[in-house]
Amino acid sequence: MSVLGTESRPLRVAIVGSGPAGFYAAESLFKSGKAVHVDIFDRLPTPYGLVRAGVAPDHQKLKSVIRIYEKIAEVPNFHFLGNVTVGEDVTVDELKRFYDAVILASGAETDRRLGIPGEDLPGSHTATEFVGWYNGHPDYQDRKFDLSGKVAVVVGQGNVAMDVSRILSKTVNELKETDITQSALDVLAQSRIKEVYVIGRRGAVQAKFTPPEIKEFAELEDCDPVVDPAELELGPADKAELEDAKNVHARKNLAALREFATRAPRNVNRKCVFRFFWSPIRLEGKDRVTTLVLEKNRLTGEPFRQKAVGTGETMTMPCDILFRSVGYKGVAIRGLPFDQSEGVVPNEKGRITENGTPIPGLYVAGWIKRGPSGVIGTNKPCSVESVESLLADLETLPPCAVPDSGGLITLLNGRGVRVITFADWRRIDLAEVEKGKERGKPREKFLSREDMLSILD
Ligand code: NAP
């Protein structure tokens, strides 16, 4: 029988990424009944991944899941090692000297591309940049968003597109008591955007956003949601999709959009227009984007497999700023296999594979395992599955050479890396909450690693 997981030799696991998938993996390990030591790494000095830097600031309730993660962090054998970039500060091979298993839970850090001319013109941004910027992610604080024009376009109709469109559509009054950064709020306060267009390549029935998110547009202070009823007409395959008992989400979305299409306009300053069956084919402009060219689509294929196909009909619209919100994509970690086309690490039930064969001791969980889909809670069963695979492998797992995190920390310190503990993070957390109080906000985030670290000195 393996000694790993016993009181005399706890199973040592390194989890790379402290977002929901990482925390649920830790929780699942602690609930396994084995003696386990978990070190969870993050490249930022702050934990919680997209719960901190992705979830919209006006969705504070969603962030309450952090309390569950705080409980997990209270387990004595849990350690946070923040400000450490695995793949750069330390390699996965080096981690394997100190841990019996490594679980990669690093999420999907980059964006899918549209692949159209003009995509990289100034004024064309990824949703990731904008979301990271207003949420205080240190990597995006140097981004500039010129909101001095009238028309903003958001491409894509997932929940990230909803977040971006809603933030552009809300007033400062609606955002000022959230944890949006003050610097973002100051820029948004000067916004002259009057029209936000949210562009879907398929129809309302196929839209990826969820009912609570679309319904929020009915309640905005100074912005009306607008839909052309002609774009809500249904084909036979759409009707079949709607009739599927499980497709509650599409029925609710459609009901909300039909209500938008019939409501009387209010005397407000902004409108948010949801368009369906249009694909961007080109962005135009001399020094920056000024015009967007779209092609009308029709749908072909079986219900639930309908694809957008261009009809040749085009439309040109003014566009002062554009946000591409067409899905995230994972980034390869040095030394690990990677499926470039899918943006995920190849795996079987969470076991990382190379040419179809599992690599002993290496696992993956969350978006980097299955792609960027689902809500925060979807990561729980995903991480549980990976941990079950790990535990099933325990008998054959070779124990690591140095079962001691101290050696790793010495190695990191020797490389000039300042490792942030959970106690350090608590101090950063408290300082942010304190700073927020002055402005009636849940917190005012530090915008750079340096600022976060300086309060520890
Ligand atoms: P998503 O849900 O996959 O939506 C991507 C959108 O981009 C879809 O409308 C998709 O259209 C469109 N798209 C993709 N390629 C395109 C192209 N080449 N041209 C035009 N449109 C294109 O992704 P997401 O919005 O980034 O969200 C990621 C995950 O996070 C989702 O599971 C989401 O629910 C979750 N999330 C949840 C919340 C929340 O719970 N409030 C908030 C934010 C994010 P097709 O459908 O035609 O592919």
Image (cartoon, rainbow, N blue to C red):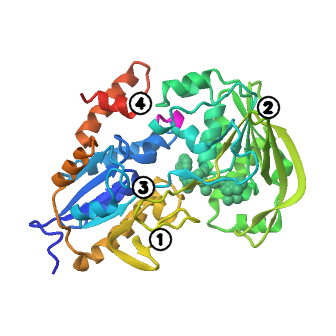
100 vs 11, nearest the viewer? 100
Callout 4 touching callout 1 (CB < 8 Å): no
Left or right? Give the position of 203 relative to 163: right
The residue to which callout 3 is attached is 106
Alpha carbon of mark 2 to alpha carbon of mark 1: how far? 50 Å
- Locate residue 354: give its quadrant: bottom left
Callout 4 touching callout 3 (CB < 8 Å): no
Q: Which mark is residue 156?
A: none
Marks 3, 2: nearer the viewer: 3
- Residue 213 appearing in the image: no
The region drawn magenta spans: 133-137
The residue to which callout 1 is attached is 346
Is 104 drawn above or below residue 44 in the view shown?
below
Q: Amino acid at mark 1?
A: Pro
Q: Residues within 10 Å of mark 3 (few under 14, many from 20)?
A: many
Q: Chief secondary structure of the magenta span?
A: loop
Q: Amino acid at mark 4?
A: Lys
Residue at 25% in and 75% down: 397
Looking at the figure, which quarter contains the C terminus?
Answer: top left
The residue to which callout 4 is attached is 445
Q: Is mark 2 within 8 Å of ligand 1?
A: no
The residue to which callout 2 is attached is 265
Alpha carbon of mark 4 to alpha carbon of mark 3: how far? 22 Å
Residue at 50% in and 31% down: 180
SS for callout 2: loop
